[in-house]
Image (cartoon, grey):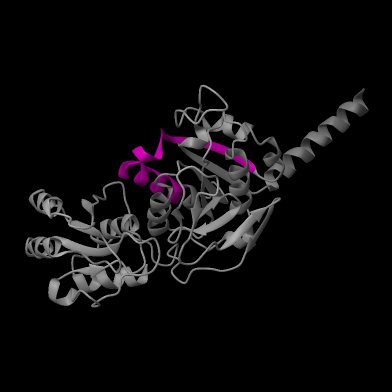
Amino acid sequence: MKKLLSILSFLILISQVQAQQLPRVIILATGGTIAGAGASADRAGYTAGKIPIDDLIGTIPSVKKIASISGEQVASVGSQDMTIDIWKKLAIRINEIFKNNEADGIVITHGTDTQEETAYFLDLVITSDKPVVLTGSMRPATAISADGPKNLYDAITIAINPKSKGRGVLVSFNEGIYDAREVMKLSTTKTNAFGSPNTGPVGQAYDGRVEYYSSSDREVNPKKPIVLTPDTKLPRVDIVYMYADAPADQIDMLISKKVAGIVIAGVGNGNFNKAYMDAVKRAVAAGVIVCRASRTPSGRVVLHDEINDEELGTIVSDDLTPQKARVLLMLALTRTKDKKQLQEIFFTY
C-alpha cells in the first residue's frame, strides 16, 4: 500500500511539474456569438454572450494538454454593443497581465460584428510583443456544427506558438490567421466570414499546427504603441457614408455637435459630391479634422488626387477602412491636432 501511495504521489508531482511547464494562456471573454445560446440547434436565432467562459473552455478539454488555461469574463455583449469603455478595459488588463508576467499569451473571445475594430484598437495600444489573438464564431454554441470550439482551439495554438511573438494583435478565424490592421468581416453569415482584401491572411492554423507565410511592415505592437491610461479621454469621431446624391445634413449636424473628427466613407478613391465638399469646408473651418476614406473594400485613398487635400484641409486614411480610420483618428487626436502629423500617423500605423 505504501509503495502504491508513493507511486501515486510521484505521478501527481510529475503532473504538477508538467502543468507548470505548459505555456500559460488567459482567455478574456467579451461575449458574442461564440458564447451565444439559441432555443433550437437548427435555427439561426440566438442570444449573444449567454455562456460563461469556463463553459466554453470545457468544450475543448484536449486543449489542457497543450496549455495552462484560465479565463476572465470582461464583458458579456454582442459585439454590436461593443464600447470604447470595454476597449479600454481590455487594453489596460492586457498590458497589466503582460507587465506582471501572468501569461505567455492572451486569447480574446469576441463577437464578429466589430471584431476587426477591437483588434486594431488593441494593436495600437498594447505595449508587449507577446501574442494576443482574437476569435469568435458565426454559429452559437448551441447550434449544429458550432464553429466556436474549433476557432477557440486554433486561437490558443496560435497564442502559444513562439512564431506568433512580435506580430502584433492577430485574428484567428476558420483556420486563417489575419493581421489586425488588415482583417475585415466579409460575410454576414458564412463561417469563412473574415479576410484581408488588400493582403490576404498572414498564416494558417490547422490540426494544431501554426504556419506563417507573411508579416506586416506596419506591425504596431510593441514598437510604437499609443499610450492609453484609465484617464485617457478619447475624442468623438464619427463616420459619414457617401452615396449618389447624398445630402450634407449629417456633416452639418456633426459640426453642430462639435465632434473632434469626421471620417467620410467616400466613393471610389475617397471622393464625394459638391454638397459634401461644401460641408467639409465648413467642418474644417470649424476646427473638425476630416479624414477621407472609401466605402470600397480594398485599395487606398490617395493624397492630393482627384481632391486637393492640402487646399481643402483634409487628410486621407491610406488603405484603412472607414471604421479603422475612425479608431486611429480617435487615438491619434490624443497625441496631436496638427494635420501634417496626423497624416504621417496614417501613413505609419
Q: Residue at x 54, y 23 (%)?
A: 40
Position in image of residue 286 (x %, y %):
7, 60
In the image, residue 82 lies in the stretch drawn in magenta: yes
235, 24: nearer the viewer: 235
Above-or-below relation of 311 to 291: below
Above-or-below relation of 246 to 293: above
Position in image of residue 172 (x %, y %):
55, 51
Q: Residue at x 64, y 33 (%)?
A: 59
* Direction from residue 188 to residue 231 in the image, left or right: left
State the residue lying farthest toward the front: 245
If the image is split into quadrants, where does the N terminus sit?
Answer: top right
Q: Residue at x 22, y 74 (%)?
A: 340
* Direction from residue 271 to residue 282 in the image, left or right: left
Position in image of residue 207 (x %, y %):
71, 50
Position in image of residue 146 (x %, y %):
59, 36
* Number of marks in picture: 0
In the image, residue 330 lies in the stretch drawn in magenta: no
* Direction from residue 309 to residue 103 in the image, left or right: right
If the image is split into quadrants, where does the C terminus sit?
Answer: bottom left
Start-end of magenta stretch: 68-96
Residue 8 found in image quarter: top right
Q: Residue at x 46, y 42 (%)?
A: 110
243, 70: nearer the viewer: 243
243, 266: nearer the viewer: 243
